Image (cartoon, rainbow, N blue to C red):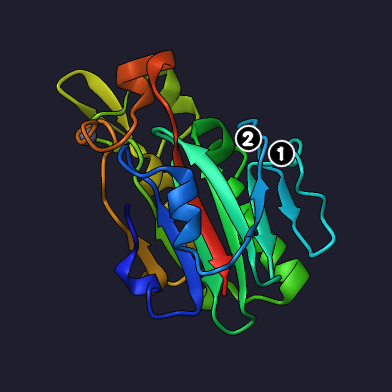
């Protein structure tokens, strides 16, 4: 399991499962007898759902890669292997958010859309929101084509005639552009490709791989 130490002192449960952790076991650690689990369809786009006590959670929420809630006991979940899971928590308004950010979702501003949804629904101020980045493929291992440069000219670096995309860096930049404070951003720094013995890595294992679960819940 991966936790962000900086978020542990708040009344939220959060974490990312690794290869050894079963989702059922992880959900038991959340501190809710039976958490209501919000699963997202994850279509690599920018849409965000506001999950309330009344939201039907019997199936995945269609068309969404992000979710927000201020309802206690509702666990927001995204599944990833290489894509970046982003946790959001507003300690003032006591609201949370989650995002699944692959490059396509990042191009649609999924992380920013979650912050804007928290702003619109709960009156959250971006500068007060705490942000956590979970394990994802990092610049060290995320080689892209030269053509990829057009999507994120500021977040692709060239090294020895090869191009590498900084997915976490791009998301951080987008969040900073909304007024999120650098001191409120926490990154576990784990690369799923460098540490594929502990984490699932789609790039290395393709369709044979599974997914890590990232979950956040208000206690
Ligand atoms: Zn790496």
The one nearer the camera, 108 or 51, is: 51
Where residue 9 sits: x, y (%)?
39, 80
Q: For the view shown, which residue lies furthest in the front direction?
A: 33
Check if mark 2's residue and mark 1's residue have beta carbons within 8 Å.
Answer: yes
Q: Residue at x 75, y 58 (%)?
A: 51
In the rendered view, does 186 fall on the left or right side of 95?
left
**Residue 75 higher or lower than 219, as above or below:** above
Q: For the view shown, which residue lies furthest in the left direction?
A: 160
Q: For the view shown, which residue lies furthest in the right direction?
A: 54
**Residue 35 higher or lower than 63, as above or below:** below
Task: Determine the image quadrant of residue 145.
Answer: top left
**Residue 204 higher or lower than 183, as above or below:** above
Quadrant containing ligand 1 reads: top left
Residue hosting label 1: 60
* Label 1 CB sits under 8 Å from any ligand 1 atom: no
Residue hosting label 2: 42
Where residue 104 sits: x, y (%)?
56, 31
**Residue 33 higher or lower than 133, as above or below:** below
Q: Secondary structure at mark 2?
A: loop
């Amino acid at each position: 399991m991966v936790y962000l130490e900086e978020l542990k002192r708040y009344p939220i449960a959060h974490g990312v499962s690794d290869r050894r952790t079963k989702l059922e076991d992880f959900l038991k650690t959340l501190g809710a007898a039976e958490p209501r689990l919000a699963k997202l369809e994850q279509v690599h786009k920018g849409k965000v759902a506001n999950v309330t006590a009344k939201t039907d959670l019997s199936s995945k929420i269609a068309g969404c890669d992000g979710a927000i809630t201020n309802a206690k006991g509702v666990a927001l979940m995204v599944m990833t292997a290489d894509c970046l899971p982003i946790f959001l928590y507003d300690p003032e308004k006591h609201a949370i958010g989650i995002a699944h950010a692959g490059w396509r979702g990042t191009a649609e501003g999924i992380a920013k859309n979650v912050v804007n949804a928290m702003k619109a629904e709960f009156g959250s101020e971006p500068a007060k929101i705490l942000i956590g980045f979970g394990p994802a493929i990092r610049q060290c291992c995320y080689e892209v084509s030269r053509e990829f440069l057009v999507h994120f000219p500021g977040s692709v670096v060239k090294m020895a005639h090869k191009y590498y995309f900084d997915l976490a860096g791009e998301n951080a930049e987008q969040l900073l552009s909304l007024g999120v404070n650098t001191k409120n951003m926490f990154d576990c720094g784990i690369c799923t490709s460098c540490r594929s013995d502990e984490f699932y890595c789609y790039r290395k294992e393709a369709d044979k791989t599974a997914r890590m679960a990232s979950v956040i819940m208000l206690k």
